[in-house]
Image: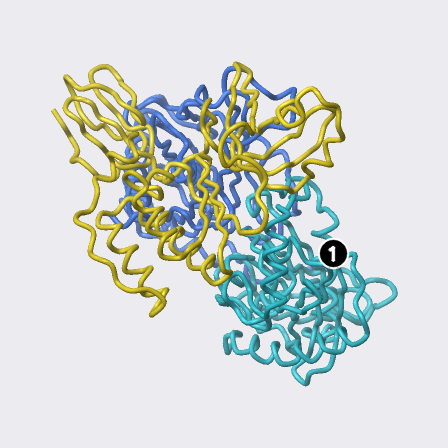
Chain colours: A cyan, B yellow, C blue
Amino acid sequence: MVQSIVPQIIKESVVNLIQKGERADGRALDQYREISLETGIIKKAEGSARVKIGKTQIVVGAKPQIGEPFPDTPNVGVLITNSELLPMAAPNFEAGPPNETSVELARVTDRCIREGEVLDLEKLVIIPGKKVWMIFLDLHIVDYDGNLMDAAVLGSLAALSNTKIPSTTIEGDEVVIDYEKMVPIPIKEQPLMCTLAKIGGELVADPSLEEDDVLDARISIGLRVDGSICAMQKGGSVPLTREEILKSIEIAQEKTKELRKSIPKE
Amino acid sequence: MLLIEDKQIVVPGEILAEGDFHSGRGTFKDADKVCSSLVGLVAVRDKKISVIPLQSKYIPKRGDVVIGKISDIRFSMWNLDINSPYSGILPAAEVFGKEKRELNRAFDVGDVLFLRVVDVDEVKKVKLGLKGRGLGKFRGGILIHITPTKVPRLIGKKGSMINMIKDQTKCEVVVGQNGVVWVKGKPEMERIVQKVIKTIEEEAHTSGLTDRIKNMLFELLGEKTEKTEKTNKEEDFEEELIQ
Amino acid sequence: MIIILTSKLIGNSNKGSLITSGTKKRPDDRAFDEMRPLKIEAGVLERADGSAYLEIGDNKVLAAVYGPRELHVRRLLKPNMAILRCRYNMAPFSVEDRKRPGPDRRSVEISKITTEALNPSVFLEKFPRSTIDIFIEVLQAEGGTRCAGISAASVALADAGIPMRDMVAACAAGKSDGQVIMDLSEWEDKEGEADLPIAMMPRTGDITLLQMDGHLTSDEFQQALDLAIKGCQIISEEQKNAIKNRYGD
């Protein structure tokens, strides 16, 4: 990915506005852009969602496959998260193997979903130590307009909540998969992520493309329904203070409550 | 035989006329047919048919004024992104004359400049210059991007549209022919100008735009301005666009 | 050992094809010359210079265009014209069995023939030394994604304001259950006797893509070709509507 050069005057105007408590698109500092979420949009995927935050758009698909568990965790199912920053999503995204940004996005999303215990991985075991469900979560980023992390987690949660897997029975040493009897995947928790950008010494929620380009530092916080923390990631090369981090958590706790309203009731 | 109406939206490959017609901008001839090569609005002037594109990239022409961003500093020149398939160069001599100085003392990567296209050679090397009134580096303000074909619409007949915006918002507005617009004023006014310009871009192909923009300005500015007299008529927008 | 009790594929689409054989109806109740439901939308993405979304049957395809833009790979540069580059890609979740991300031999071939199918339609000579990049993403595949991709890409090119001689439309015909048919579904493609995807510029009738696999007599080939051409004409009308709808005409 080629780094885009941000015009100096844009940087100044974004920073100046934020220091006055305003943003270029008219939002309050802690305000999200419009969010839209649709689920079940890909029939070929056992679970799917299309999420939009502002003009950022991600299509998420979840596909279960039967596989072997990892040797060190024989009694839990497997979750594999992968993301593609498609070259269609932005002029500076390039085709090819996942770059740092893409890998970070996939790993942070994975952490939030995994540690937030969205899936009851123990219930995905078919034959302990031998056969488990592996859930492949693929994030297809089709339009990049800032704040991928929050969209990725929201889309992943929605896709998983929408996922059905075929029921299995064991007859002798054979696994019988019944595609006629699809059952919802067991969902335990509903963590969400809230990203704040530090710009001009202030914290702003849901950074836009322009803000993502000029931010000094970024903090993404994954929170469960009860407000407890399940994942965090700091980005950007400017440090954060202890107070800023604690304040971020407070804001994120408020904001994830709002975000939660966009999740469709299954 | 004319197969379309004036101002109609057409698509690439659409046959516009058969027989004795001339192929203007945005069209091509196939035997005796004039066809559109673009998504755009048809403009019929006597026997000449043109299509004004609704979307396009800026192709540099000598004499144009453009807004560019310094993207790199080389040995004796700056490279500029001018929102075009062809990037521009600003030779050090344009700025320093014969004097030898460090380039980044004058302009650094990320600086935004108002420039003139001095020359475009056959290998599409775009030479830029700063000699002329108002040319140079911008300080402060914001940038707005519009599709370059809509620049004439933003300027309006004899500057009517852009002057109305400037007068009402008390902002400085500089329009590059490459679709980059620089605006500087009070931050809330800058944002109003941004909204208005985006509306002009979206609705450039519709009629009655000047009056709608005027109303929009009044609404956005609220009591900040007094209503002025209604403009006499909607200008013929193809005329502006074809120029 | 794993036993699959009900295959998803058979479960979904093999609805009594044997019963209908000999009649004009197909597994999904279409007539032999009937296309699946088609929907095209232009200008669906924010960042791309031009974009389009196309659904045909259960195919869901996104296309985006960037350019003409500066070409940084000097060895590809053409002094007298732009180059067209195309990348066809399938989302991992677009097919029954998850596809590994990244290009495989199939998608590389489709990218190449897509480039060649669109190339003759674009006035490349207007933008020497630049590149026009097309990205096609298959979000859901149900037979005929290459044609869907080409038709979507052409709308995206038009949406990006790229001058063209015509909008290329693509459609397949083929033979399944002994009958020559238009616009093969996934099942008809897999189980059928022949598949013939084409792309054309409808104004002149010039064919810019032609592939075939299977077995057809020359009479059947001609029938199939005519059906595919008819299909392209239907798609072409929808492409025009998609562009005009974008501007509220």
For label 1, the SS is helix
Q: Position of residue C229 (x, y in %)?
A: 31, 30
Q: Position of residue B165 (x, y in %)?
A: 36, 52
Q: Is residue A74 above or below residue B175?
A: below
- Chain containing mark 1: A
Which of the pair A192/B202 is nearer the observer? B202
Which of the pair C64/C128 is nearer the observer? C128
Residue highlighted by disc 1: A104
Q: Is residue C129 left or right of residue C30?
A: right
Q: Is residue B182 left or right of residue B237?
A: right
Residue at the spot 52% in from the left edge and 78% down from the top edge: A261
Q: Is residue A33 left or right of residue A119?
A: left
Q: Is residue C139 above or below residue C190?
A: below
The mark total stands at: 1
| Three-letter amino acid code at the position of disc 1 | Glu
Q: Position of residue C111 (x, y in %)?
A: 55, 32
Residue at the spot 39% in from the left edge and 40% down from the top edge: C159
Quarter residue A182 falls in: bottom right
Q: Is residue C77 above or below residue C99?
A: above
Which of the pair B162/A124 is nearer the observer? B162
Crowding at mark 1 (Cα within 10 Å: few <14, some 14-19, many 20+)? some
Instruction: Identify the residue at the far right of this view.
Output: A72
